[in-house]
Amino acid sequence: TISQQLLQERAEYQHSVARRKEKVSALENQANQLGLQAAQECERLAKDRTLTLQMLQKEKERLSALERRYHFLTGGKSFPKSSTAMREVFRSKLDADPGFSFHQPKSGSASPLQHGAATLGRNTGSKQSPLLVVGSTGSLPRNLAATLQDIETKRQLALQQK
C-alpha cells in the first residue's frame, strides 16, 4: 500500500541521512587531524628557519672576521672578487715577505676572532689551526691556496643572502 511505501522511503531517506552524517563526521575528523599536522609542520618549519638563520648569521660573522683578518694581513686591501686574485695576493705576500707568519699566542688560547679567522670558517677538531702551524722558514703553509676557494665560496654565499 501507499502508506507502507511511504514508510519504506522515509526509512531509506533516514538511513541515507545517517550515512551522510557519518561521512561528514569522518571528514571533519580528518580535516581536524590535517589542521593539527599542518600546525605542527608550521612550527617545525619556523624552528628550522630560525636555526638556519642563526647558522647563517654565525657564518656571516665568521666571514666578516675572515675579511677583517684579510684586510689586516694585506695592509688594508679589500677581499678580491675571485679566488685566483686571492691566491695571487697571498703568493705575492709570501714571496715579498719571507718573514710573514702567524704565531700562536703565548697564553695558549687564541681569541675567538683570531681562531675564527685562522680556521677559515671550518670546524677543526684540534686546538691548533692550519694557519698557526709555522714551517721551518716561519712563513705560511704553501697549501693555503686550497683553502682560499672555501673563503671565496662562503663569501659569495653570504653576498647572495644579503
Image: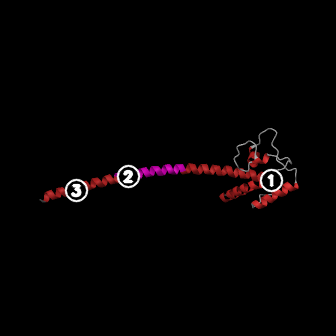
Closest to the observer, 150 or 38: 150
Image coords of residue 154 (percent x, y)? 69, 55
Badge 1 element: loop
Q: Which residue is disc 2 drawn over?
A: 28
User: Counting other residues with Cα less than 10 Å from the Cα at mark 1, is it few (<14), some (14-19), or many (20 or more)?
Assistant: few
Q: Which mark is residue 12?
A: 3
Query: Predominant secondary structure in magenta?
Result: helix
**What mark, if any, has residue 142 been given in the picture?**
1
Q: CA distance from mark 3 to mark 2?
A: 24 Å
Q: Residue furthest left?
A: 1
Residue 151 x %, y %? 73, 55
- x 72%, y 52%: residue: 63
* Crowd rating for badge 2 (residues with CA inside 10 Å; few <14, some 14–19, many 20+): few
Nearer to us in this view, 99 or 41: 99
For marks 3 and 1, give the CA distance: 89 Å
Label 3 environment density (alpha carbons within 10 Å; few <14, some 14–19, many ≥20): few
Magenta region:
25-44
Determine the CA span between mark 2 and mark 1: 68 Å
**In this rendering, position of residue 125 left or right of residue 14:** right
